[in-house]
Image (cartoon, rainbow, N blue to C red):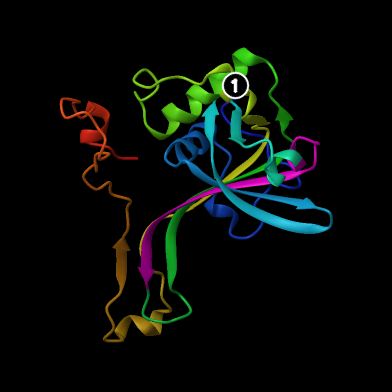
Amino acid sequence: MSEFTPTERTQVKRLPKRATYDRETVYGILDSGFVCHVGFNADGQPYVIPTNYGRAGDTLYLHGSPASRMLRTLSGGVPVCVTVTHVDGLVLARSAFHHSVNYRSVVILGTARLVEDPAEKMEAMRIFTEHVLKGRWNDIRQPSEQELKGTMVLALPLEEVSAKLRTGGPVDDEADYALPVWAGVLPLETVAQPPQPDPRLKSDTPLPAYLKNYSR
C-alpha cells in the first residue's frame, strides 16, 4: 500500500488539508531526522522523552539502557506516541495572528515490542548508526556481546501514522496587505560545522568522506 490507512486516532482534524498519509512522505520526514519525542504514561504521570531512533521499512527502532524508565515502561506494552518534527522556516505575516511556521511532522501511535533476537538486535544497532551517519558502521568496532546485553532495543511498527506539513508564505487578511510591514518566510535549516577531531586521534587518521559534506 502506498498510504497508511487513517484511523480514528490518526485522522487529522485540525487543518486536514495539511495532512498526508503517503508512505514515501512519512519515510522522508523520518529519514531526514534522528531525534524523536516519545510520549507515554508511567504510574499515572505522563512523560515526553527525546531520544534517537532508526527506521527499517515499517519499523521504528528505539534503544538505550535497560535501566531507562522509558524503555522499561514501553517494553511492558503500554501505548506510546512518537513524534518527529522539522521546522523549515518562520512565516512572518503582517499581523500577529497570522504568523506561523513551515514544518514537516509525523505522529506514530502504537505499542512497542522488546527485541530479543540477537541478530535483529545487532541489525537494529547498525540501523541506528547508519540512520545518523551513513557509512559509519563499517568503520567502527561493532558492539560486543556484553555491550548488546547492556542495550535494550524496542521495535515500534509503523501502522497508525499521519504526517502534517505547512509550506509557502503568509496568508494575511486582505486589509492588512496595505500595511508597511515586512512579510515573508525566513528559511531555517540544520547545517553541520567542521568536524572537531578527538585530541587522542592518531595524526595519520584521514577524515571520512561521509563527514566532509554531511547534511540531513
Which part of the image, by quadrant, shows the C terminus? top left
Asked if residue 54 is positioned above or below residue 184 in the image, the reply reads above
**Residue 57 appears in view:** no
> What residue is pinned by disc 1?
146
Residue 27 inside the magenta-drawn segment? no
Residue at the top extreme, as displayed? 119
As drawn, 57 above or below 33 = above
Q: Quadrant of the N terminus?
A: top right
Which of the 4 image quarters holds residue 172? bottom left
Residue 10 placement, left or right of 3? right
x 22%, y 27%: residue: 209
Residue 111: image location, x then y, percent: 75, 36
Q: Which residues are magenta?
A: 73-92
Q: Residue furthest front?
A: 200
Task: Tell me if 152 is positioned left or right of 93 in this view.
Answer: right
Q: Secondary structure at mark 1?
A: helix
Q: x, y (%) of residue 196?
A: 24, 43
Q: Residue drawn at (56%, 23%), measured in percent from left and top?
A: 124
- Give whichever of 68, 133 is nearer the camera: 68
Image position, residue 210 (x, y; %): 27, 29
Q: Quadrant of residue 44?
A: bottom right
Q: Residues within 10 Å of mark 1 (few under 14, many from 20)?
A: few
Residue drawn 59% across the image and 32% down it: 60
Q: Is residue 77 magenta?
A: yes
Q: Residue at x 61, y 17 (%)?
A: 120
Can residue 55 be seen from the camera position used here? yes
